Image: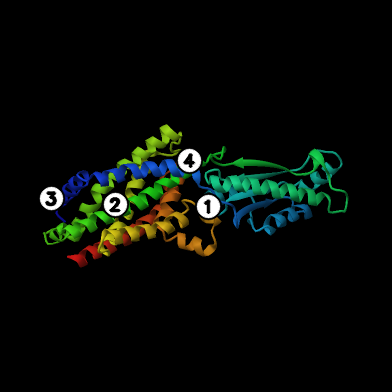
Amino acid sequence: MSPRRLWVLVRREALATLRDPFTISILVLVPLMALLLFGKILSTDVKGLDLGVIDASQSSASRRLVAELAAQGTFVPRPFETRDELDRAMLAGGIGAGVVIPPEFERRLRHFEAGGPPPEIRVVYDGGEVVLAGNTEAFLSTLVTATGRELRTADGSAPPTGERASGVTVQTTALFNPDLDGTPYMVAGTFGFVLSFATTLIIAVSVVNERFAGTFEQLQVTPATSVEILLGKILPLGAVFSADVVLMMLLAGFLLGVWPAGNAFLFVVISTFYLLVSLSLGVIFSATSKTSAEAVSKTVLASQPLILLSGFAVPTPNMPVVFQMLSEVIPATHYIRVSRAIYLRGEGLLPLLPELAIIAVMGGVLATIALRAIGRRS
């Protein structure tokens, strides 16, 4: 690979991009509009959520409570021995929430019937997953309240009324985002949508238009290699979208009050790395399309699983198992997890390495396919 030839290609692509007002408007307006529009409007319900359970009571009352939580189909209980184990499972994404039942639960329930204070259970959730967290807290509180009434009337006595109707108090703990503000959640996800959809669309249409004008074929008969042509295409757009990432961060911070809880520089670096994955996918779409309309259609079609399966609009733990498996082969799924981990939980580099490794492997596969697609056109 010749650095001089690569620089010529990069400079050529950058000048072509800057001379096109439509492309410039898309590069700037789409990220900003998506950030503002998606920041407020999406929500989902809870279904089949993995629920960590620490049952320190091991009594008939506590087992009845856990059984009722599972019977509704909203939660799938998973037992844990200690709070540390539960917290680690939640941070790793293995569970969406947790319930801690104290050892004296049944005794306090009976003591409450005699006029004492109500027993407590603790609900723990990841406030970073704001959609799940808000609905989880509401579901758990409702189910525990109803079950508390049933436990107290299991002996056939008259149901209690008034302030003492429940019999169980729910204490909640949020590991992150305790206010359950939905804006940071959607802002972090919007980065994944923009860097996946807009980048793929722009480069796909750009390459198809060049082929239609005949300039791409002229480029292929030059001494430039497929690697140089690919890098010449994606590096300028990658630089522009990297600037878009910074612009979106500033817009989210000043207009929406959302700043990354983690390292902003790390977030920009990872986002730039992810851009190479999306841009390679755009090259593949363009190399297999004869017209701009076909390239746009493929990009729009690919955007459907991006929105529905990547965790951008619907949390992946809330999906059926089959769709959870499908979501794992979508690069945006892993980037959105990284984005939310940095923005909401302030994660550093080391905890993100598994997701980054998956993105790197997917990027390598897509780049190889893109190179072969360019080579077949030469």
In which quadrant is the N terminus drawn?
bottom left
Dot 2 and dot 3 residues touching (CB under 8 Å): no
Q: Is residue 184 placed above or below 230 in the rendered structure? A: above
| Residue annotated with mark 3 | 4
Give coordinates of residue 339: x percent, y percent. Answer: 43, 46
The type of residue carrying mark 2 is Ile
- Which colour scheme appears in the figure? rainbow
Numbered disc in front, either 2 or 1: 2
Left or right: 29, with 375 as reference point? right
**Which of the two labelled residues, at mark 4 and mark 2, occupies the earlier sequence position?**
4
Nearer to the camera, 354 or 47:
47
Query: Can residue 345 be seen in this snapshot?
Result: no
**Which of the two labelled residues, at mark 2 and mark 1, occupies the earlier sequence position?**
1
The type of residue carrying mark 1 is Gly
Determine the CA span between mark 4 and mark 1.
18 Å
The type of residue carrying mark 4 is Pro
Dot 1 and dot 3 residues touching (CB under 8 Å): no
**Which of the two labelled residues, at mark 2 and mark 3, occupies the earlier sequence position?**
3
| Residue annotated with mark 2 | 202
Label 3: how many Cα within 10 Å (few below 14, some 14–19, many 20+): few
Numbered disc in front, either 4 or 3: 4
| Residue annotated with mark 4 | 184
**Which of the two labelled residues, at mark 4 and mark 1, occupies the earlier sequence position?**
1
In which quadrant is the C terminus drawn?
bottom left
**Which of the two labelled residues, at mark 1 and mark 3, occupies the earlier sequence position?**
3
Give coordinates of residue 259: x percent, y percent. Answer: 43, 36
Numbered disc in front, either 4 or 2: 2
Q: Which residue sits at x=42%, y=61%?
A: 329
Determine the CA span between mark 2 and mark 1.
33 Å
| Residue annotated with mark 1 | 93
Numbered disc in front, either 2 or 3: 2
The type of residue carrying mark 3 is Arg
